[in-house]
Image (cartoon, coloured by chain):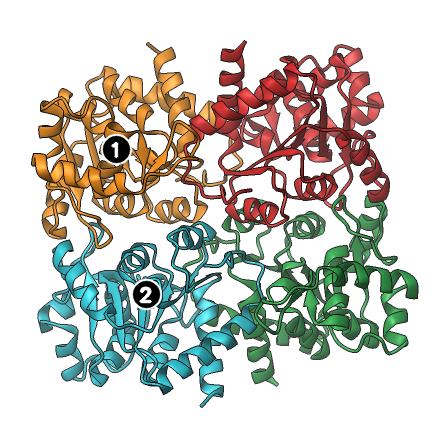
Chain colours: A red, B orange, C green, D cyan
Amino acid sequence: MNGEVSPERPATSIIRRIAKELKETKARGGKIVVVAGPAVIHTGAAPHLARMAELGYVDALLSGNALAVHDIEYALYGTSLGVELEEGGSKKEPRNHISAINEVIKAGSMKALVDAGRVKSGIFYQLTVRGIPYALAGSIRDDGPIPEVIKDSGKAQVRYRELVKDADFVLMLASTLHSIAVGNMLPSTVKVVCVDINPAVVTKLSDRGTSQAVGIVSDVGAFVPLLIVELEKLG
Amino acid sequence: MNGEVSPERPATSIIRRIAKELKETKARGGKIVVVAGPAVIHTGAAPHLARMAELGYVDALLSGNALAVHDIEYALYGTSLGVELEEGGSKKEPRNHISAINEVIKAGSMKALVDAGRVKSGIFYQLTVRGIPYALAGSIRDDGPIPEVIKDSGKAQVRYRELVKDADFVLMLASTLHSIAVGNMLPSTVKVVCVDINPAVVTKLSDRGTSQAVGIVSDVGAFVPLLIVELEKLG
Amino acid sequence: MNGEVSPERPATSIIRRIAKELKETKARGGKIVVVAGPAVIHTGAAPHLARMAELGYVDALLSGNALAVHDIEYALYGTSLGVELEEGGSKKEPRNHISAINEVIKAGSMKALVDAGRVKSGIFYQLTVRGIPYALAGSIRDDGPIPEVIKDSGKAQVRYRELVKDADFVLMLASTLHSIAVGNMLPSTVKVVCVDINPAVVTKLSDRGTSQAVGIVSDVGAFVPLLIVELEKLG
Amino acid sequence: MNGEVSPERPATSIIRRIAKELKETKARGGKIVVVAGPAVIHTGAAPHLARMAELGYVDALLSGNALAVHDIEYALYGTSLGVELEEGGSKKEPRNHISAINEVIKAGSMKALVDAGRVKSGIFYQLTVRGIPYALAGSIRDDGPIPEVIKDSGKAQVRYRELVKDADFVLMLASTLHSIAVGNMLPSTVKVVCVDINPAVVTKLSDRGTSQAVGIVSDVGAFVPLLIVELEKLG
């Protein structure tokens, strides 16, 4: 991570640089892999990550059950863990979380919900309609989980490895568990950008000696929207 | 802080709400006070805070020596503690920090540098040309300090109190020291928004029982630029 | 967590209180469950957690692959991820980590290594010789994993639930993933103490409304040794 | 800080090493300077820091108003900011904080309270009866302050410099403000150990290039008691 783990770095110019590198990677046909934790949803960054996929900057997504469940909950009900995101977190509908899980289980998959016109927005909507592959690794803390989740950790690792193969740029967003897993799978030549609000997570990832890695201590809820602003400026 | 201290909150909708409240406060002639730490500069948020002043959303600024020195260094040389912010933190000119201090001391004040046409941008440029009052409290860790700094802590408290008097909205940006000082001076009826990347700081401020306070665990380097985007949308 | 999530709490008196409650729980035949992350090893707390088991204060342990691998590595070679713990982290033998995994796989289980007299100390040595049950949940970031790990997340949840059933006191040590999983399985009447150096983790666990929970922002590397000092004082 | 900024380090062996170095420094007549923030009190470490002075391991103390006020409050009433430390933080007497300040102001100094037999324990009791010098730097957030506080930041820096002159070992405990100030005053040959629960503070201090510095992400409330255990073992 080249020692760039301090929160005291110029976020806007770093974001501009990352946007430029993403555009260059895309322009030369490179592969962009995003690793994302559920904080992407809670912090309100989901519509922006969905937009990133829409703009063609996501070639594969690696995550777990929680991101998918929260994304579907948000697409169906406008809430995340029952909290209304648009209203700044005031109203609560705690049952929406379980309902979202049940809807996916009933339909059989998130794809089935998209095909049936039930889910019309969000990260997994964009991935589905664009045929962008994703892998959801199971974990001990999963609610549900939804059918797409790979419950066997060995099989999940195999699928993760398939999707990160030939990656040129990996963007890790607020996910300690999945980011460390992916970090272990990458050759040191792959460009990695890791964004997390916890400096200890960023330091831990940097300790692994991935020489092409940049660690950024920031809030994905503000970082991802700004990244989209820059990507859209680049056209 | 109403328990809103988790990083897992929708940043963009909270920022939208804050922008709206700032606009309403301004519209009815209310007083907006900003408390800011040096991380505002290091994270690249300075041009955005300067823009906030330009847009009329800053009626007083409370800070210390470091913010001013870094702001002048950036205005004179484009660096912060010798690091080139625009280039994403690669080049280094460690002497710029001391040079900036010496330039202010030689000129007699930041105002003199602005009047002489030496400083043409930045937070203190905007405050100076608009006649917006500010107070810089001295501290044991000051380099310099520059002449505007009030070295006596008792006198600094008096000046701080004068400037927060009749405040309607206080925005605290990444400054534990000054934010706690100001928090102690405010009646509980004043609207307070505190943004810091360290959840412990936000929790500490919330423990003080300021009932109108909202704590946001975020990165000011991404938060302030997004706030300006929203303020400009509101016109 | 009753608002007790600030780092600014008197650690020694809280630890004394917890020691007293653990002793009372044990005295009346209550069940004590420990949830532990790999930081327990890295921070040097492993011999102290092993001692806690030896003293009869652990009735079940819930964790993952990393804790077990690091514990066996430490028992076999005196290192954790190749770093010599006793020397304060100076020398490095990066291959020890993989060797430890291979030794367990070759032997068939940690129990086999203990039975063969190869592993003579550590957390899992104490659990094995005392017949204390444990469950290791698989995860996407596992190296190995060793045979005892339950790779299917659904089956791991079933086993976790069996072990936390009838728990009277749950001590969570530096493990976000497993602690949140266990928190979701517990009725709100169970006494929970959660220790983590990251205030956001402690806040997140407290948001779940477990009314008997106490959150402590501390370093398990210093917290657990002090807890053992207090437990030994109580006799 | 030699990269030793991760929380994942073996606390007990590091503490043992520090205890050994403190003893060696003392044995050869070296000067030990402690820099301490108010968290030393809130976390319950005060009696242990007082004991460290009693054992002869403190040759000078650098801090601010808050540490002294909280220490006197604890000596007079057994509370810190009105919270009873011994009871684990349950009862509250918010007026004790102001009363402690008033008692010192009335007496004229902490020394006068000690001489009058009013204050019989605590950090400043030990410093006073042993004639160990200390400097308290004023700051914008001071309540009171008490008479010993040096309100002028320039004069406080002069006094700090006098006390750190010829220091051989500097122990920084949970005080960002004073630690950064002292870090700026030290030649890079002085041994520095910095303990803070916030990894960003430890990283920031390490960025300053003090080559003899060791950064430890830990909880002073558990760290200092363990350090005393080790110092007492060494005799």
B77 and A45: which is toward the camera: B77
State the count of labels: 2
Answer whether residue C166 is visible to the viewer in this image. no
**Residue D54, horizontal then vertical, whole percent:** 32, 84
As helix, strand or loop, the secondary structure at mark 2 comes to: strand
Q: Quadrant of the N terminus of chain D?
A: bottom left
Mark drawn on residue B71: 1
Residue under the point 12% across and 28% down: B113
Numbered label attached to residue C159: none
- In which image quadrant can residue A142 be found? top right
Residue at image coords 55%, 72%? D12
Q: Residue at x 71, y 59 (%)?
A: C94
Q: CA distance from mark 1 to mark 2?
A: 30 Å
Q: Is residue A116 visible?
A: yes
Which of the chains bears the disc numbered 2?
A: D
SS at mark 1? helix
**Taking C146 as reference, is B218 left or right?**
left
Query: Subunit of mark 1?
Result: B
Above or below D147: residue B164 = above
